[in-house]
Image (cartoon, grey):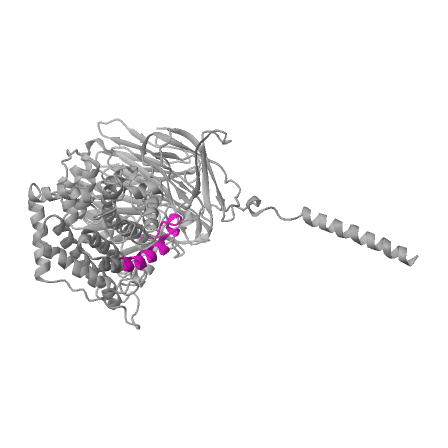
Amino acid sequence: MTSKIFGFEKILCKLLLTAIVLLSLSVVPAPAAQQKLRLDERPAEPGEWGYRPAAGAVYRVNPPSFSWQPQRNQTWEIQCARDTKFKKIEYRAKNIEFNVHCPPRTFKPGTYTWRYRGKDRNGRYTNWSRARTFTIAGDAAAMPLPVREELMSRIPKTHPRLFVRPEDLKRLRKLARGKMKQEYNKLVSECERLLARPLSTEEPSKYPKDIVRGSERWREIWWGNRTYTIRALNGAATLAFTRLLGGQEKYGLEAKRILLDCARWDPKGSTGYRYNDEAGMPYNYYFSRTYTFVNDLLSEREKRICREVMKVRGDEMYRHLCPRHLWRPYSSHSNRAWHFLGEVGIAFLGEVEGAEDWVWFAANVFFNVYPAWCDDDGGWHEGVSYWSSYIGRFTWWADVMRAAMGINAYDKPYFSRVGYYPMYLMPPGKVSGGFGDGANRKRASSLVPLVSQLAAQAGNGHWQWYVEQMGGPAVTSGYIGFLRGALPKVESKPPDDLPASKLFSGIGQAYLNTTLKDAGQDVQVIFKSSPMGTQSHGNAGNNSFVLWAYGQRLLIRTGRYYNYGGPHHRDWMWSTRSVNNITVNGRGQRKRTADARGRIVAFETTPSMDIVVGEAGGAYEPPVLDRFTRAIIFVKPELVVVYDRLEAKEPSTFEYWLHAIEKIAVEDQHNIRVRNDDVVCDIDFLTPSGLTFRQTDQYDPNPRPRITLREWHLTAKTAEEKKRMEFVTLYRPHRIKDRIPDEAGLERIKGGYALKAKLTDGWFTALLPTDDHITLKGHGLESKGAIKCRLKRAGEPAEILGPGE
């Protein structure tokens, strides 16, 4: 009996083991290639480039550049179809290295839908992304990016490769002996000067261990090492290039000496890119230019020395920039570093491992995420000082791309409009350039060299007219000037066919002018409410404005930019208190962040009136405001109405800030005067009543003692705490000799205010809503939730501006 039981148990155990084996086989994981990965489709955050083309976007460049959320250890596939079901796929690309892609061919104009997915190293795919539908405009500019192999094949195998190709030398030498002999002789004179006083090539010192970052001594070393490096290596490039044109051999030998001496510098020392990028960047591109210009004089051993140095320096830049810059391209210095890396890559292509990657990365930045600080309108978030600096340097890369790869940067829509930005911001003769670090030290005349180049490259008559008003055009000096040759003649065209005012929507700035022809005759209001926030060098608060009249600065942005992130810069210039704006319970907008965003919600312009409306409630430190809507109405040239609607989360006091060069005269809230030389602005706070005023010429904090600049800051504070507040303020800019009426009335009506103001030759009336849903009626006007204006000048028909008109 027992043996039978044991026999039965053995059979049962075998059956059980068999079942376990079968069961285990049934749950064996699928091969790695069959397993799905999860696609990261988080929405783009402020400071990220975002998914492009966005749903509903209309593209004016063909093909569009594609961009999506990066994931590590992935290659990518995109599909672009004529239908939303992807049954008719018009374009497909696989094994894409980066999270951006510009196709190598153009598409037919029309509507498309695109999606993407990732693949890991084991061959596993993610799910497809959500589909996004966009349109390519019929007039879109053709800008395909050649495939990698073709792009590299365009670059010369021999030297020189930067700015000039080997086959160009014969033509350039002929020019040097002929019609450009004068320009060539200037280069020769410069070379003789450099030989007479040989350049120092001793390696610059690093910072002492006990130095305080940002201190005066630190700045001397930081910037001094930059200028020292440029002086040495740009001098070498000048010598080497002049020798290529037929200059004496001694020029090349001196260039070679400087190059090899500088090659001994520690690549991660005082001029290392990560140690001091202001010295490291010019080292890298001027070294590369000298190397390619003097290459035929270098022995193989000397070439190897140069290659070893630039392998270290190029890798350091590449690791810092790639792939991060393709998704987060809003780092200021990185927006020039990428194309400097491109120069290094071209100079050392085929000679240094990784150089091809550097070139391919730079090409992908240009085609997919550049320029970052604007849209196609041509503005620049960081302001005119950084615009002129960065676009000026970018023109070098444009020259390099054209010569080495046959790519014309000026085909991009941005560069077909880029010159209108200075025209609207800084009419001829203007001093100081609105918002942005360093902008208040700019003059319109300082932009002539850059705009001359842009006018010639684009063949734009308006830009040519602009530079001619200030003594231009100007020819670029040095070897780059020689290579660009005599600027082609562009027919000048006055801006008579242009509106005087313009919105640059990508940077959220409106430039309201009475004329573009002469700053001395212009009254100008600049208003900012930016979707790019307060990041980088464009750190002024949203819903800020500044006012110029007849060549004089009246209401200004304040402070002195001398040390980025230093106490004065960080705590005053980044503060809402430093601009013509409003704080709530003493609190302002978030500082230096893409999160502190504003937006322009309305813009209309006519020869007689402009209206711009911005919303910036979300830019404030939470929880402060649910709403801050600022509307500016410009009745040209003598009246500016600023209407503010604020809704706080709790009862609050509101501080209205105004700033001027000279002390502001305050009698009461209806009689305030700002003066600069022979121009004044009379100010009347119509509402709220009971404002109290405080004025000082001190910043908080003041700049360093060596900076003696002081400006005046007026604060108008509300009398009681309220959750909702409106300000209606009139500004009347004029020359002192001109008599301007001051009569104005503000009536509270159901749903808002009715404003009436006398002009020198008529009357201006407006409805200003306090409720978005109530219909306002007054002065013969009617509007629901929106501003409506009426201008009646003597002897002219009435002009109405607002919804429905």
Q: Is residue 369 above or below residue 797?
A: below
Q: Nearer the viewer, residue 772 or 501?
A: 501
Q: Does the magenta stretch include residue 330?
A: yes
Tell me the quarter of the image containing the C terminus: top left
Q: Is residue 692 visible?
A: no
Instruction: Give the image location of residue 241, x and y in percent.
Output: 15, 51
Foreground of the two, 317 or 757: 317
- Residue shown at 37%/52% (left/top)? 322
Residue 539 x/y as whole percent: 33, 52
Q: Specify the segment rendered in magenta.
A: 307-332
Figure label count: 0
* Near-viewer residue (232 or 455): 232
Please tell me which residue is depicted at 23% across the width and 40% down the height of the picture.
419
Q: Is residue 689 visible?
A: yes
Which percent across, then down, holds residue 177? 7, 44
- The quarter of the picture where residue 780 lies is top left
Main SS category, magenta section: helix
Q: Where 460 sits versus 40, above or below?
A: above
Q: Is 179 one of the magenta-colored residues?
A: no
Q: In which quarter of the image is residue 379?
A: top left
